[in-house]
Image (tube, helix red, strand yellow):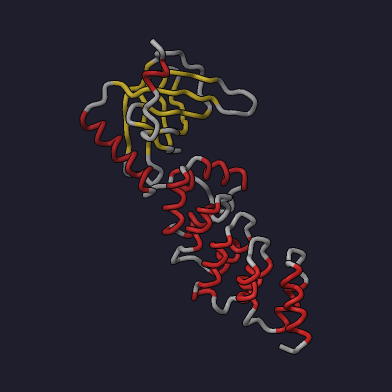
Amino acid sequence: MNSDSTFRPRRGHRFSAGVRGLLRLSGGDCSCEAHDLSRSGVLLTGDLPTLAPDQRSDLTLTAPAGGLEFRTNVRVVRYTAAEGGAEARAAVEFVGLSADQREKLEALIARVIEGLTPAPLASLKPGAPTVEVRKALDAIPLAHRVALAIRASAHEREFLRQDTNPAVLEALARNASLHSAEAQVIAASPHVLPTTLEILLADARWARDEEIRRLVAIHPRTPLALAERAIASLKPLELRKILQASSLSQALRERIMRRLSHGH
């Protein structure tokens, strides 16, 4: 029997999880992380011992926020040993799920899809290194990150604003709880689209935020018309600060110099 054919669900039925896992083996319990969760199996990563094909074990998956555990018997389908800095990986298949187990599995999948518990981000501590943040973000599907960014909490926004995908940053710019300092980080990101910069500039919350206006004006992706709107209400002192920016376009530089020379 081809093991892959029994494990791999149809594309679109697998969900990135990143939830905590505990594999019970004869040599002792082994902590791991669960990824690519589906209704038929999951991919486990971590400091896993060598696992043989068809080996059976008990697995517990736990939502990071607690209150939800999914326990089941699993069969090892595929195992890859740790190599070159990469963690060991084991694809396992759920075996003999009862009606109650299927219900709990659906509940866990629902949390992953709906973003009620964004597992990879929930496990990060404030001030986590960039490499850890990027790894956590990569473990979450793009559609999930975009949906999460619109309503993200302060803890989640700390990491989402480091996302390099323009769609996530644009969704984050629309977050009703966004703070001025966070909006400034988004405005300074090299990954934002012109539409995101326009959203920030049009937001009434930042109408008096001179730093956001400065950042929008000097951003390499800001169209000239938008940049002119950004500096329209700025005073000479702020305009002179903008002139010091190396990223300032020549066209906008000339317009600012003209304004200053006329005393506007």
> Quick one: which residue is furthest to the top in this view?
1
Front residue of this view, candidates 249 and 18:
249
Front residue of this view, candidates 158 and 67:
158
Query: What is the total number of numbered labels drawn onto the structure image?
Result: 0
Q: Is residue 116 above or below residue 37?
A: below
| Residue 228 x/y as whole percent | 64, 75
> Quick one: which residue is furthest to the bottom in this view?
263
> Quick one: which residue is furthest to the left in this view?
99
**Which residue is at 47% across, 45% downward?**
142
| Residue 58 x/y as whole percent | 35, 23
Q: Quadrant of the C terminus?
A: bottom right
**Which residue is at 49% across, 76% downward?**
204
Residue 224, by quadrant, is bottom right
Q: Is residue 230 above or below residue 113?
A: below
| Residue 86 x/y as whole percent | 59, 28
Q: Quadrant of the N terminus?
A: top left
Q: Is residue 151 above or below residue 144?
A: below
Residue 24, by quadrant, is top left
Residue 7, by quadrant, is top left
Q: Indicate left or right for 201 with 34 as reference.
A: right
Q: Is residue 33 above or below residue 52?
A: below
Q: Indicate left or right for 27 with 246 as reference.
A: left
**Which residue is at 44% across, 44% downward?**
119
| Residue 148 x/y as whole percent | 43, 53
